[in-house]
Amino acid sequence: LALAAAGFQTARNGLARSLTGKVSPILNSWSRFTFNLPFSTLLVLGLVGWMGVPRLSAPFFGWCFGTAVTQLLGNVALIAAFERANFAQSITLHKLEIVFTAVVGVWIFAEYPSPLGWAGILLCGLGVLLLNLGRESGPAGWRRAFHLDAGALLALACAVLLVFASFLLKEATAVFAVSNPRVGVGRFEAAAHTLFHTTWMEVAMLSGALAVGRPGAFDGVRAHWPRMLGIGMTSFAGSLCWFWAYSIALVAYVKAVGQIEAVGAVVLALVVWREREVWRQIPGVAMIGLGIVLVLFG
């Protein structure tokens, strides 16, 4: 599930990157959630018809709201990073979330990886720093791995926000499963309902913000709706895989396997946007791959 999610997310981020400069970061993010909503709605309607109406509690909606806010802000931060840094740098830096995930998981949510899992997680984090070291800009030497410009800071802010979003949505699926014992260990129904309720909240918040703050912002939808539809479709598929994976495994492990997205970002950067500096980031890609293998064995 994590590998599939990473693939869909790479495609979604590539489409979102292609809209930078054409629409605002907020409208770009709005397209992700708005064009996702029809698919998640149809899925939930199908589940309700098959399984019946689930029991939804106030804590469930509270966790969904927290997920919506943090995920929405994280997505806007990533889109803004695309406008200030190259695609590969933005994606790889925001993949430092794996390190943040392990720390937050132990500190707040009592998720403890095995020693081999910790080794893989740390190796993935080092791989991302090595990718950053291969950039053309920044100070000389090893300090380049930690050099933070505006684009890098936005990508890191995205990483932190998405870490909390991941744990919050996991709590939402857990509360749903407690209220609906029929869900069982598979938790697909819980993931689908969490995705739906999180998405409509995000659409409501972003639509309101755009209507009040930027009344003419929706004019760009008519010109770019085919690409926005692609963003929504890949967002739905990727989010469903992420939500389901988080509900049945340690968040740190899911994030570690999802590091493969950084490899996909490097390929897109080379093939589509001709970002030549990416050639120097190949060692980091290899280290991330090794880290994923350790996580899987762990």
Image (cartoon, rainbow, N blue to C red):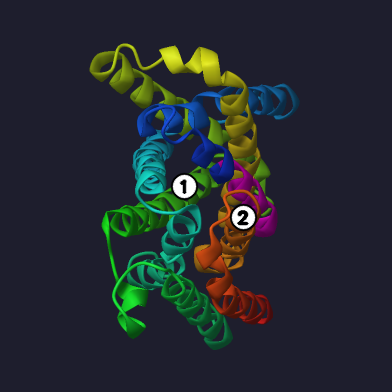
Q: Residue at x 36, y 17 (%)?
A: 217
The reply, left or right, for residue 196 in relation to residue 39 is left
Query: Residue under circle 1?
Result: 169
Tell me the magenta residue range: 1-12
Q: CA distance from mark 2 to mark 1?
A: 11 Å
| Residue 29 % position (x, y) | 43, 33
The one of 266 and 214 positioned closer to us in this rendering: 266
- Residue 48 or 281: which is nearer the viewer? 281
User: Is 141 in the magenta?
Assistant: no
Residue sitting nearer the eye, 12 or 46: 12
Q: Position of residue 201 (x, y in %)?
A: 41, 28
Residue on which disc 2 sits: 245
Quadrant of the image for the N terminus? bottom right
Residue 178: x and y in percent read: 53, 46
> Is 100 on the left or on the right of 128, as rendered?
left
Identify residue type, mark 2: Ala
Residue at the (43%, 34%) spot, across then down: 57
